[in-house]
Amino acid sequence: MYYVESLRVTRSTLTCAFWLGVALAINIIISKAGHVNVDQPMQFSIVVVWAFAGMVASIFASLLGCSLARENDGHLAVAWTKPFSRVTHALAKMAVDLGAVGLIFALTCAVVFIYLATIGVTRDIVVTPDAWTQLLRYLIAPAAFYGLVQALTSTLARQAGAVIGFTWVGLIGLIILSIVSLPAPYHAIVDFINYANPLVYIAFDVDKNGAVVTYGTAGAAALALIAFIGSATAIYRWQRSEA
């Protein structure tokens, strides 16, 4: 039940880890060549690190989010003959996927901290009172993207990859539409759709004093709800598929 998905996820994780390593090496080389060394204090919240890691992990999660769709591509008849329920089969796949997503989140944090240490700014990182609440939010964020993509692709097969791309374009487009001035009632419609847009809840801003302004526990709860509804919808639709 786990073997094939574990192999696929392992390959994807190693590929992502490789490119994170390449990005780290390039940035270190550039900083050394340009003699980048920050002497003046420039305090910033550790939440910025969480946010970056959450974004990288969310992209990775969305790529893994078509695991049920991959099962539809010529493997569904075999899956239905296995001696456990379809729900159990789907949950096992999701557990493997989300375990890898958590690993990529941790690895991205490590890469960022290594780079910050290289340019000598780790001393300027501030652990704000809400840091651990924000860590929870950015850990849940990838699961929300994962659940959304699973819900959109669980009954597809080879078209799932294209859906991932269009999903990101659509989510970004909704954010842009929420910013521009739209005539009524279109702005209200966009705002309503954006309640299900994970990008809304992972956003943060920096005020004039350098403090990070973000969603709190409400954002984490919204992301958890998107993750749960998306995953539950995906499992429901997938188990009703016909081989």
Image (cartoon, grey):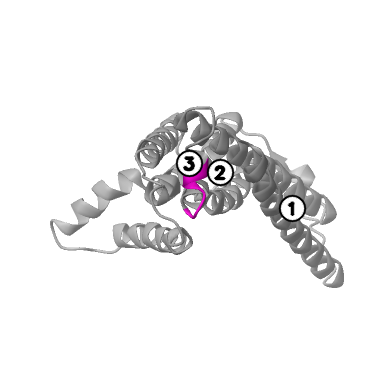
The crowding category of the residue bearing disc 1, from other C-alpha atoms within 10 Å (few below 14, some 14 to 19, many at least 20), is few
Residue 14 marker? 1
Quadrant for the N terminus, please.
top right
Q: Quadrant of residue 133?
A: top right
Q: Circle 2 is placed at which residue position?
A: 211
Helix, strand or loop at label 2? It is loop
Residue 30 marker? none
Front residue of 228 and 28: 228
Left or right placement of residue 46 versus residue 130 in this view: right
Q: Circle 3 is placed at which residue position?
A: 214
Left or right placement of residue 43 versus residue 190 in this view: right
For the residues bearing labels 3 and 1, Cβ distance under 8 angstroms:
no
Residue 40 position in % (x across, y down): 76, 55
Residue 92 position in % (x across, y down): 56, 33
Left or right placement of residue 81 versus residue 17 in this view: left
Helix, strand or loop at label 3? It is strand
Q: Report the residue at 48% width, 61% height from top.
A: 161
Q: Which residues are magenta?
A: 73-78
Helix, strand or loop at label 1? It is helix
Residue type indicated by callout 3: Thr
Q: Report the residue at 46% width, 63% height from top.
A: 165
- Residue furthest to the bottom in view is 33
Q: Earlier in the sequence, mark 3 or mark 1?
A: 1
Residue type indicated by callout 2: Ala
Residue type indicated by callout 1: Leu
